[in-house]
Amino acid sequence: MRIRFLYRSVVGFVLRVLHRDKYAAPQESHSGPSALASLVLALTVMNRALDGVPIPGIQGAITALLEVVRTLRHVDENAQEFAYLREKVLLIDREIVQPLSDPTMRANVPQSLQTDIENLVRDMRDIARTCQSYVRRSSMEKFFGYAEDIAILESLNRQMDDALKWLTTRGVISLRIEAEAVRRRMITDLLNRLPHAQARYDAGVRNQASGCLEGTRTALLQAIQHWIDDANPQAPQVFWLCGLAGTGKSTVAQTVAETLQKSNRLGASFFFSRDEAERRNPLLLFSSIAYQLAWFHTSFQRCIASSLESNPDLGRAVMRTQLEKLIIEPLQKVPINEAPRSSVVIVIDALDECNDVDRVIDRIIILASELPSLPFRFKIFITSRADPHISNTFTSSPMAPITRAFLLHDIEKSIVKGDIRLYLSHHLTKIAERYSIPLPWPSQEQLTALVDRAGDLFIFA
């Protein structure tokens, strides 16, 4: 009788659960996880107690009821999972979606991140609709579809986790990109505030200055190229090209700068000119070189910008401070593993044409003395006339041991005349073609006369 009573009690309980209000929330049910767990335990004990009892079909019935109750546990667990999932959706909506709906907040969010948030909203809405659909189903549908619901829950949780992970990852990446963009803008602003002259080898104010005609100055250019390529630490780090006015120093410097630019080794260039105020201003030399070096190499830029962050007015300081704080100290801080592998060269042309040449030379001596302390090969190519002070500087201590001096006026006259002849022949032939002048023009005798009149001066040609 007791067994029959217990059996009827269990059946009644199961029937009540199966027919409970389909809209009841999981927490309102009287069959919470603890009650169902107790019932599973009771049925398990009963099943064992009836082992060997001669009541036909009783153990099979108990086993069946046990499976039913276990299924009900799954149904309740599913209901709780769906409710928890819905709470997570509401939390995401409250903490992420709603704040970003505010126009002020949205304006500060990168466009790529806004798209990711919109995708998250779409996924959350899909999950919310699925959860709502589950709530509307009857208890019987939940009971018989519990296995499919478990699979759906796993899929929804995976979908939510993937969406949140994607948003987080993209958010971190977007913020880092934005932070880097802000940093770059700050560096650009700092560098653009650095005073710099339009004195590069390719500056527009130089009226498209041209280099050496192909086939001329070959020995000289080869010597310069050998100096540039020489990786011997004991090799001179300064090349001084000296010559009289009109011997073609600036043309050679132009060729050197163009060649270095093509091989990505031109750190900076400054072409002095006494005819232009900013190009003869010595206070713009080192700030202009620092400006160009900063755009030449990212490590240079970072170190130079760091100096400017500490003192944004360095570009207006005296020459020595500019040299030390904008060039020497920043370049000494470049990590060895980030330093350029090949030589970095700066080209300074017509040194004699700056306003305060003596002071500039003193600063160049300081720079040259610090070159060995830099974590990369840094070289200086300089041209000037044979000014006594300049000549004495580069041919005596401390500059002489680290300087490769080349005097243009010491080149054999026959070589110079041959270069001038080639130059004149090339350009006069172009003039003849342009104006339909019958060739040969000029005659060889006329060409020889022009070469003789030019002497050693390319400027005549």
Image: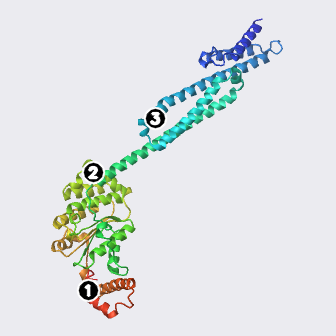
- Residue 357 visible in image: yes
- What residue is pinned by disc 3? 100
Secondary structure found at label 3:
helix
Residues 105 and 222: in front is: 105
Secondary structure found at label 2:
helix
Identify the coloring: rainbow
In space, the residues marked 2 and 1 are separated at their CA atoms by 49 Å
Residues 161 and 123: in front is: 123
In space, the residues marked 3 and 2 are separated at their CA atoms by 37 Å
First reached walking from the N terminus: tag 2 or tag 1: 2
First reached walking from the N terminus: tag 3 or tag 1: 3
Secondary structure found at label 1:
helix
- What residue is pinned by disc 1? 454
Residue 443 x %, y %: 34, 92
Residue 8 x %, y %: 75, 10
Residue 146 x %, y %: 69, 26
Quarter containing the C terminus: bottom left
Please give the name of the residue rendered at 18% of the width and 57% of the height, measured from the top-left corner: 318
Dot label at residue 308: 2
Residues 334 and 249: in front is: 249
Quarter containing the N terminus: top right
Note whether 364 is above or below 58 in the view shown.
below
Residue 376 x %, y %: 33, 61
